Amino acid sequence: MDTQVLIIGAGPTGLTLALDLSRRGVPFRVVDASPAPFAGSRGKGLQPRSMEVFHDLGVIEPVLASGRFHLTMRAYQGREVLREWDVHEGRHATVERPYASTMLIPQFRVEQILREALPQPVEYGMALTSFTQDDSGVTAVVGGETVRARYLVGCDGGKSFVRKELGVSFVGETHEDQRMLVGDLRISGLDRDHWHQWGGRVDQWLALCPLPGTDLFQFQATGDGEPSLELYREIVRDRTGRDDVVVKDATWTSLYRMNVRMVDRFRVGRVFLAGDAAHVHSPAGAQGMNTGIQDAYNLGWKLAMETLLDTYEAERKPVAEWLLGMTTAIMMSGSPFERRGDETLQLSLSYRTTEGEGLHAGDRMPDGITEQGRIFDLLRGPDFVTLDFPDGPVLVRPDGYVAAIGRSAIDAYFGANPVTQLHHRRVAARTAA
């Protein structure tokens, strides 16, 4: 084998998977057809659950330093301010939920942080042109080079070559009437402390959001046509009705067509699909980048142990189904920028198979304080961890979800999955807050 895992696509999904595998000592290569890193802000909202993932992966500090919480929305008619509001008003950090609301951070900065944390470079200009698989591995041709790997993971976006080669159905629909012009622009005449919006009618809607840590604004506007700097200037002029808001230049432009689709399978033999290659949806609610990050986080430890691989689809497919319905409902509500429910924060997503109050197997393990330190710090690392609380032990999976509660349930879990004991440590967790 040339490598253990060949990752196709170096967006947030592929890079998160690469970083998770690297800390487990799993050989990998991550390749991308593009000649250079993506330079746009296709995604710009990082959810609390993704920040918890990045805490575990050891990159939360530069992420927090690069983003911003609680940016006030401001609606205008021309120069007149009609209204101001905070979508996440009242959401503040607690002991159990240290990251309480969505953080604004451009996708290109998230990718840069993940790349810089990797022990080896991403291989750009390496397009996947074919692959075959057998009982022991996958043979792929990337950039004209033949590579042999035990597993291949397609993280190559909504137009995924991997998905198409597998013949996996991408079930759903395209909303041709839902189109949006997007881009990253340099603009003068606006402050950077508000997310500025105009348009009383849907066809006149325009939003300009300052991207933290940059001199750019993300441009979003309903409309159609070939994206161009002149078109964006015209839209800003017409919809703001102001001559003091001036578009200087653009670093990235695109036309978004609303697709709501997902695969019917996340795995075919030794090939897996993750992120946009497996599901695409409305951008409302800032879910896409985050769901891909968590696909990767769910898959990484299973690839490392080469066990429980069938549970990847069993756990992530229902999340994708829920995601498509939730984001479509937000977009169709006509008020995508109003206060959203906690489900958009992704903290309540669970793999549990039983109902009831309190903590169950499959739930996200909440943070907390013990005599030994912060729970998230005790869990940090690639292993299963048994937290020995005074009222009984809790076994936590490498991805921060509860595997079993109570000694007999933990013994049964290890009995059913004996390889997991090789990746296990125990920590006393006295006087948990």
Image: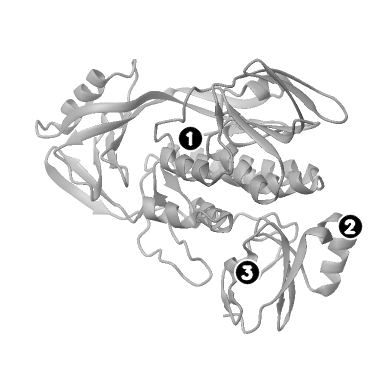
Task: Indicate left or right for 127 with 301 as reference.
Answer: left
Q: Which residue is mark 2?
A: 416
Q: Nearer the viewer, mark 3 or mark 1?
A: 3
Q: Give the residue number, with chain letter if any, for mark 1.
A: 282
Amino acid type indicated by mark 3? Leu
| x 57%, y 69%: residue | 367
143 lies left or right of 166? left
Q: Looking at the image, which residue is at 84% across and 62% down?
A: 413
Q: Name the residue furthest right.
A: 415
Q: Earlier in the sequence, mark 3 or mark 1?
A: 1
Q: Disc 3, disc 2: CB below 8 Å?
A: no
Q: For the residue marked with disc 2, what is the amino acid? A: Ala
Gap between marks 3 and 2 measured at Cα: 25 Å
Would residue 213 appear left or right of 359 to someone viewing this image?
Answer: left
Find residue 245 and report its image quarter: top left
Compared with 320, 125 (above or below) is above
Residue identified by numbered label 3: 378
Secondary element under disc 2, as helix, strand or loop, is helix
| SS state under label 3 | helix
Image quarter where the C terminus lies is: bottom right
Disc 3: CA contacts within 10 A as few (<14), some (14-19) or many (>=20): many
For the point 32% across and 47% down, the residue is 212
Residue 340 in picture, x, y percent from top left = 43, 52
Q: For residue 6, which numbered disc appears in the image?
A: none
Give the mark, 1 or 2, whose residue is nearer the N terminus: 1
